[in-house]
Image (cartoon, rainbow, N blue to C red):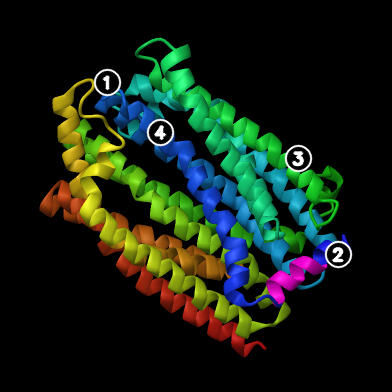
Amino acid sequence: MKKNVIDKRTLFAETPVPRALFTMAVPTIISQLINLIYNMVDAFFIGRTGNSYMMAATTITLTMVMMNVALSNLFGIGGGSLVARLMGADRPDQAKRVSAFSVYGAAAVALLYSLLVGLFLTPLLRFLGASDATIGYARSYALIVIVIGSLPSILSMALAHLLRNAGFSSQASIGLSGGGILNVILDPIFMFVLMPRGQEVTGAAIATALSNTVACLYLLYAFSKASANAPLSLHIQDARRIERANIKGVFSVGVPSAVLTGLFDLANICVNIIASAHSDLVLAGMGIVMKVERVPNAINLGICQGMLPIVAYNYSSGNHARMRSTIRTARMVGLAVAGASIILFQFFAGPASRLFLSTSAGDAETALITVGYAALFLRIRSVASPVQFINYHTSYCMQAIGNGKSTLLHAFVRELVFYIPFMFLLDRLFGETGLAAALPVGEACGAAFALFLLHRALKKAHSQL
């Protein structure tokens, strides 16, 4: 174990910051992008049918899938951030217990979520905006991917976070990426070969659940293998021996991270409800945009997740100059990606939207209307990319230094004080275009507040040296 720990210390503490960030972030970006395929590939192949109602159904269930991400963050980011800080403080035994506790905690919360969704599936789908035309598709997808498939989905993401924060970014990337690639292969087989016509959504759900399961099994194997050379553990005895202070440490970062993603999901639920009140086609168009715009978001999340363990390690070891350099470098790279995405989406909003809904199959008239909505919404919402990155970046920085209170405050203010109220206000004033414009307005306000919180947190950390 000693040699591997020394290697990770060299990477986190001595390797030039751009190279260290590149080493950690590139595999994470790749895994983020291919993990995105888990959700996007279903929509892509469903879009080949030209059925706008199937597309609307996947938009409704996307919020339920995103809750898997929130729950995985509870133990994945909460436990992973603490593992990195304990490594920086040279406490490998405690890190092992934290990692084991996080694995079993993620499994338990996944089973609970599956049970609750299964008990209240139909009323939940109605609340999320399902109409008579979409609820059948939405129910079949959610039953397989959420009720049956949440355990491997949540557990695989949590395992990937823990591996990444222990310095095994490549293994985490291989697991999530492999599952995404498998999903690309299985989707058309189940949708268009094995399942009868009209059951494409069910076929997509089966392919996704199987891919998640395979990814989870690989990550369990990679985690077990890495535990021989790193402070990671799958032993239930280690989970039981975790110190009370470390349980608090997991939740102090994990809860705000989960709440942040959960509130983001709540905002998407509000978008769906408002959009569905206009029409199923507006809802389908907004659903296309939510998938397209996640490409630059996935890249920037990968940058932030690659940055987190380096910041956490150097914060804990007292090397605050290196910590600040890492923060600045990640911020510059992320803003460059966000700026490029605005330019691309302004010019290619139409073609990007048509990737997810064929206008030459099925009901071409409704498909053309849906794509028109999507292109308009994408041009408006893409303007939010830079300030959206600032929100991600500052939140991950505060999680890295263990400042859960500021992370939680930022999450609530960003969504509940700014974005969601602007959503209802601008929709009321300007209709569906106002609904799209609420994102850049709300995210800009949230970013300004986030920068204030981060400046205050770093100033406090510096004063404690």
- For residue 132, the mark is 1
Q: Which residue is mark 3?
A: 221
What is the secondary structure assignment of the residue under circle 1?
loop
Q: Which residue is mark 2?
A: 3
Residue contact at pointers 1 and 3, CB within 8 angstroms: no
Give the side of residue 325 with respect to residue 219, left or right.
Answer: left
Disc nearest the viewer among 4 and 2? 2
Q: How far is disc 4 from disc 3 in space, using C-alphas?
A: 30 Å
Residue 165 image offset from top left, x and y in percent: 67, 59
- Checking the image for residue 373, the label placed there is none
Q: Tell me the amino acid under the disc marked 2.
A: Lys
Q: Which secondary structure, mark 2?
A: helix
Give the spatial CA distance, label 1 vs label 3: 43 Å
Read off the magenta span.
Answer: 6-13
Q: Which residue is mark 4?
A: 61
User: Would you say residue 463 is visible in this rendering?
Assistant: yes
Specify the quadrant that holds the N terminus.
Answer: bottom right
